[in-house]
Amino acid sequence: MKAVILAAGVGSRLAPLTNDRPKVLVEVLGKSILFRQLDWLAAAGIASRDVVVVGGYRIDALRDALGKAGHACEIVLNEKYEPWGNFFSLQVAEPFVRGHDFLQLDGDVILDAKILPRMIAAPGDALLATDPTAELDDDAMKVQLDAAGHVKALSKTIDPTICMGEYIGVTKLSAAAGAKVFHELAKFPGEGLTHEYYDHAYHRLSERGEVPFGIVDIRDCTVLEIDDKVDLERVERKLREQADLHADPPAKSRT
């Protein structure tokens, strides 16, 4: 099992924190989002040598940080990280995961320790981590299921009333399903779809029945996305609360 972390984005809404580094290197309570993800992957049995990190903006800072920390990740350049949608970040990882099952992670989410082991253990060739309790606003990547429980549609524009939840940016793909995803992504430039998210390939393949995507329910897990400074403050507050909740109680006085 390998993993692909999509880490090419600028994160302009987090400036000036991202003036000298990509979004994934922004620190959350002293540890970057990327290093937190590498820790979760290692805990789930995926070592850094089996992780592909797709960079773009300030990839020099990415290489430097990973090198200094001793992580043996494969760092891949998405040279079109600004003009094209993030579909190309996943596409350029193809040579490094070809023939392997792999997890795909968005680089701007804080997860808890339960999600990745659950994804790895779940049966199925193509699975989307989905939260049925999420608020389905305009920015949510919404998931609609068919009668068989497979993904019928995956888009931000679906009517929330017919959706079962939000895809949170973590996917498991078998080697065979991954090959079909990469083949689908390769069609996007020729079809003028360079603005698209990689999720659109999942949508098209599942809609046609070529790769029937299923879901893994993560409603009991913590997923925290960071897009701007307000999100960062909210996430840090949430993590502090969780740390306080699990901290040992103070010793009782014996006086």
Image (spheres, rainbow, N blue to C red):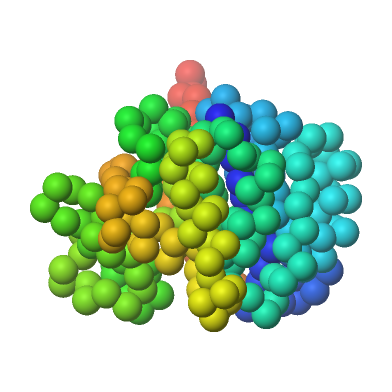
Q: Quadrant of the N terminus?
A: top right
Task: Count numbered badges in the picture.
Answer: 0
Query: Residue drawn 67% across and 80% down?
Result: 83
> Which of the 4 quarters of the picture holds residue 228?
bottom right
Query: Residue drawn 70% across and 49% down?
Result: 53
> Which of the 4 quarters of the picture holds residue 61?
bottom right
Q: Is residue 134 visible?
A: no
Image coords of residue 90 (percent x, y): 60, 56
Residue 207 horizontal side relative to residue 98, left or right: left
Give the camera-side residue of 72 and 179.
Answer: 179
Please, is residue 217 above or below residue 48 in the view?
below
Give the camera-side residue of 34 and 239.
Answer: 34
Image coords of residue 182 (percent x, y): 54, 53
Image coords of residue 30 (percent x, y): 71, 50
Please, is residue 146 above or below residue 156 in the view?
above
Q: Residue furthest top?
A: 254
Image coords of residue 27 (percent x, y): 69, 56
Q: Residue furthest left?
A: 147
> Which of the 4 quarters of the picture holds residue 114?
top left
Q: Is residue 53 visible?
A: yes
Residue 132 horizontal side relative to residue 203, left or right: left
Query: Residue drawn 49% across and 59% down?
Result: 184
Query: Residue drawn 33% across and 35% down?
Result: 124
